[in-house]
């Protein structure tokens, strides 16, 4: 008998479940806090607890599958490593498109002449001398490189040459844009490559942590990783293309929700520590986003489940908005709850909270702490002010005001936060839940002190925002309910046709809200969500009852909802694909754009057949590397032709080969 082990690493918790393959049921589950910077502690703790509760030996595990929201959370919060972009054959106008300039956040860009045209013909030679000189000048300080060349999907020669030179000179990970997408949108391909390069270190660390613990305890089984479209891929492939793991956790939650409930038509809402992910299930399947996965402000070229991801979770930052009235807003940044920080550093947290509570006025940084996320050697390649902040944190966590001595230090601290080198602790919905008795996981006394301090803040009228910690705690929970309702309504309107306004506008329309509240006057208005909502996440039972009432919807909170992602990680199929293009740059000329460069033919069908053979070989090789058994090959061809004087004229053919199957399960 073989058992399946699913692991999901989120921003706050790492979950593990053991499924009996033969009986198709969950036999054990466990949770452990996600531990940063050493993820191995949390991953190992969850795996060990789940295996112990299942009463099995590690050697009986036949397959391990991993899903994660770390990549999604990093993009939502603007985190990731410092990278350099090698931009070949583009101009400044293209650099500003697709949010590419904004995404670089001041990281270095190396401008290099070169590139090809739409037919794959070289426009100008690659300027190797300039690239070499700028690599010399860069001299470290980045964790990786992204390379994007004009029309690289038609001819990748310049990206490949740049990649080889970077590896030779810098010895750092390199992401080529043509390896991630066959699309022509150069700036979006470059953006996708940049985000991939930022995430490599993070996902590599997670996979290494999981593999290392498997070896230590004697699990000899394949390790798979959930991709954003819900398919399972090998750990090796996930290491090379971590961008494809964005929406990995949400995609796994869809599979888990379907497996747990049997529902075929529903809205799935998964609340974690950092994000809330909403997806529509129709006929038992989610849709794939045709424009590419969008997370936060970024629209990538990564194929993924059509999911609306919002920076809203149990650990979201609580903002007091300016104005005469007291108004709260949650997210998008995740904070470490004060109650959790107090569990690990009780002396620092309680002493500081007591001192702040003894004062009449509440300072801007009161109630917050700065937590270093490195062990041993401090981060390298820092600006002078960043070095100053790091120096104050070398001995461990401190009050935020002790880390930030001047106003100019605050941007430096936030850059460290953006790179995941520092985290901030402050009041979150998790702390509010401790105050209201809904949660007792961490230090409830610290939570009460922190929320009491927050209640002492004053609005624009000079009044305290709440009379007691219970009042403001309930206000925080009510705000979480309100923003969750907004997420679900936006997702519903995004799927409806015939509306002129944007989903964000419609979700907040006063007539809709009156209908949901059952307004009855001269007009009688009624509205409800027509589909049930499946609530997932450890905190869903605490929050989602009120959400269902606000939407007049049936709320489904299945058993094991708190570990649905880990379940979904092992009930899916493995799938890999390869895609390519045949173009026609002139009459009687057909070009198959292959990985090794363009191949020219005099007949369309011969060009398509050559591309088909190359893509199928590539996809099958990926499937073998992923350990897929009993493969099934499917093909999809988009043929574009125009009618000229009654005769079809070939423009291009896009071919996609997909290989699917179950991952190989180790036995014996």
Image (tube, rainbow, N blue to C red):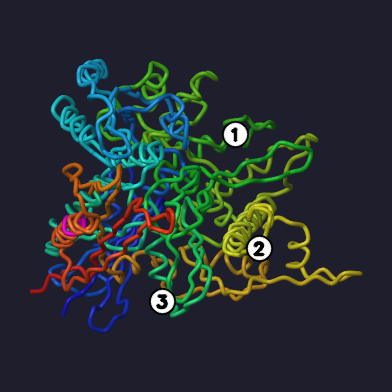
For label 2, count other residues whose C-alpha is less than 10 Å away and answer few (under 14), some (14-19) or many (20+).
Answer: few
**Residue position for label 3:** 260
N-terminal of the pair, mark 3 or mark 2, is: 3
Mark 3 and mark 2: Cα distance apart in space: 33 Å
Answer above or below: position of 238 versus 123: below
Quadrant placement of the N terminus:
bottom left
Viewer-closest of 258 and 581: 581
| Residue for point 67% across, 43% down | 455
**Residue position for label 1:** 356
Instruction: Specify the quadrant of the image occupied by residue 318.
Output: top right
For label 3, count other residues whose C-alpha is less than 10 Å away and answer few (under 14), some (14-19) or many (20+).
Answer: some
Residue closest to the far right: 522
Answer above or below: position of 177 versus 524: above
The location of residue 301, given as percent across then percent down, is: 39, 47
| Residue for point 32% across, 42% down | 196
Residue closest to the far front: 645
Answer above or below: position of 359 versus 594: above
Which label sits in the foreground, 1 or 3?
Answer: 3
Q: Which mark is residue 498?
A: 2
């Amino acid at each position: 008998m073989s058992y399946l082990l699913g692991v999901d690493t989120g921003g706050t918790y790492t979950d593990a479940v053991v499924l009996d393959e033969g009986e198709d049921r969950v036999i054990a589950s466990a949770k452990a806090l996600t531990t940063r910077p050493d993820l191995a502690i949390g991953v190992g703790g969850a795996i060990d607890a789940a295996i112990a509760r299942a009463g099995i030996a590690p050697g009986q595990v036949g397959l391990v599958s991993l899903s994660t929201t770390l990549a999604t959370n990093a993009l939502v919060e603007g985190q990731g490593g410092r990278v350099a972009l090698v931009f070949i054959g583009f101009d400044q106008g293209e650099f500003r498109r697709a949010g590419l300039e904004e995404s670089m956040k001041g990281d270095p860009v190396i401008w290099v002449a070169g590139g090809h045209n739409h037919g794959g013909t070289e426009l100008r030679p690659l300027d190797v001398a300039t690239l070499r000189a700028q690599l010399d000048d860069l001299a470290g300080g980045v964790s990786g490189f992204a390379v994007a060349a004009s029309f690289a999907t038609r001819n990748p020669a310049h990206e490949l040459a740049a990649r080889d030179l970077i590896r030779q000179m810098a010895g750092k990970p390199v992401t080529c844009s043509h390896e991630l997408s066959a699309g022509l949108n150069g700036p979006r391909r470059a953006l996708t490559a940049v985000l991939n390069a930022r995430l490599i270190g993070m996902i590599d660390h997670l996979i290494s942590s999981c593999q290392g613990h498997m070896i230590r305890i004697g699990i000899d089984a394949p390790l798979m990783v959930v991709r954003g479209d819900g398919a399972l891929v090998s750990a090796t492939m996930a290491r090379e293309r971590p961008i494809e793991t964005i929406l990995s956790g949400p995609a796994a939650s869809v599979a888990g929700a379907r497996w747990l409930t049997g529902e075929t038509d529903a809205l799935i809402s998964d609340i974690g520590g950092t994000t809330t992910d909403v997806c529509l299930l129709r006929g038992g399947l989610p849709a794939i986003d045709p424009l590419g996965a969008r997370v936060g402000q970024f629209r990538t070229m990564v194929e993924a489940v059509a999911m609306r991801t919002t920076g809203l979770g149990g650990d979201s930052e609580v903002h007091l908005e300016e104005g005469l009235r007291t108004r709260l807003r949650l997210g998008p940044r995740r904070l470490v709850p004060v109650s959790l920080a107090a569990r690990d550093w009780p002396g620092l947290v309680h002493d500081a909270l007591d001192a702040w509570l003894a004062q009449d006025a509440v300072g801007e940084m009161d109630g917050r702490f700065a937590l270093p996320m490195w062990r041993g050697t401090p981060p390298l390649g820092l600006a002078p002010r960043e070095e100053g902040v790091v120096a104050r944190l070398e001995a461990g966590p401190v009050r935020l005001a002790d880390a930030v001595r001047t106003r100019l230090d605050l941007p430096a601290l936030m850059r460290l936060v953006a790179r995941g080198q520092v985290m901030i602790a402050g009041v979150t919905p998790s702390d509010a839940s401790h105050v209201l008795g809904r949660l007792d996981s961490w230090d409830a006394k610290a939570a009460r002190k922190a929320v009491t301090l927050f209640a002492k803040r004053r609005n624009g009228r000079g009044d305290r925002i709440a009379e007691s910690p219970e009042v403001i705690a309930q206000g925080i929970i009510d705000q979480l309910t309100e923003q969750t309702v907004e997420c679900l309504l936006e997702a519903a309107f995004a799927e409806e046709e015939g509306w002129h306004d944007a989903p964000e506008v419609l979700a907040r329309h006063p007539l809709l809200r009156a209908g949901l509240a059952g307004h009855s006057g001269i007009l009688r208005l009624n509205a409800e969500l027509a589909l049930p909502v499946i609530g997932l996440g450890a905190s869903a039972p605490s929050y989602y009852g009120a959400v269902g009432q606000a939407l007049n919807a049936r709320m489904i909170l299945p058993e094991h909802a708190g570990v649905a992602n880990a379940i979904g990680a092992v009930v899916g199929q493995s799938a890999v694909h390869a895609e390519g293009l045949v173009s026609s740059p002139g009459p009687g000329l057909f070009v198959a754009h292959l990985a090794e460069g363009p191949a020219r033919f005099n007949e369309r069908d011969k060009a398509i057949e050559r591309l088909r053979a190359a893509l199928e070989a590539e996809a099958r090789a990926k499937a073998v590397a992923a350990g897929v058994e009993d493969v099934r090959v499917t093909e999809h061809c988009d043929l574009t032709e125009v009618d000229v004087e009654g005769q079809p004229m070939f423009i291009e053919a896009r071919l996609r080969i997909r290989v699917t199957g179950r991952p190989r399960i180790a036995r014996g």
